[in-house]
Image: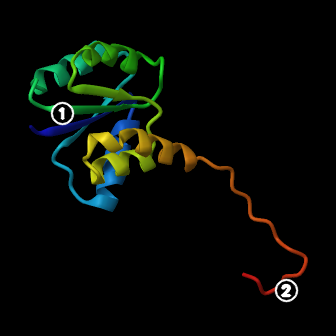
Amino acid sequence: MSRKIYFISHNNFAQGLKQAVEMIAGKQDNVTAFGLMPGGDPNAIIKTIEADITDADEVLILGDLEGGSVCNAAMRLTIKDNVTLVTGSNLTLALQVVLDSDPTHLDHQIEQARTGLKRLKLKVSSNQDDNFF
């Protein structure tokens, strides 16, 4: 059984996500990215994915936006037992699924990606000297 990962998105987000993953984790031959361009047909992307997979493949699709046209089109592939669709993808999740191929870890990987979403703000203490930076 081979593992195939697809990043799908509006515009170039999926390609950028793949490039960022490969910058950190190296070339990923089992990852393919598809972006829906203005005027494009999301069903064409899904037909391409469908033609590339078999029932023997373990397929993970990371989509950008729940309810978006690309993810809505991809939903029809989830009728197959070997296809999983996750929306709201980010770099944390993409790296985790690429580096850890155990499908039983997916729920934990999703939770880890959620906990990485934080508002950060540098707070300067009045106790710090002026040469802090």
- List the residue tagged with mark 2: 129
Query: From where the camera sits, is residue 82 visible?
Result: yes
On the image, the x and y values in percent for residue 55 come to 10, 23
Crowding around mark 2 (Cα neighbors within 10 Å: few <14, some 14 to 19, many 20+) is few
Is residue 112 depicted above or below 8 in this figure? below
Q: Residue at x 49, y 48 (%)?
A: 112
Is residue 41 visible from the viewing direction of this image? Answer: no
Q: Which mark is residue 70?
A: none
**SS at mark 1 in the image:** strand
Secondary structure at badge 2 equals loop
- Which residue is pictured at 21% across the width and 55% down the height? 27
Whichever of labels 2 and 1 marks the residue nearer the N terminus, that label is: 1
Q: Residue furthest front?
A: 104
Is 51 or 107 nearer to us in this picture? 107
Tell which tag, 2 or 1, sits nearer the viewer.
1
Amino acid carrying label 1: it is Glu
Which residue corresponds to the image point at 45% horizontal and 19% vertical from the top-left?
68
Q: Picture quarter containing residue 86? A: top left
Q: Quadrant of residue 44?
A: top left
Quadrant in which the N terminus is drawn: top left
What distance separates the C-alpha of mark 2 from that of mark 1? 56 Å
- Residue 128 vs residue 100, the one in the foreground: 100
> Mark on residue 58?
1
Residue type at numbered disc 2:
Asp
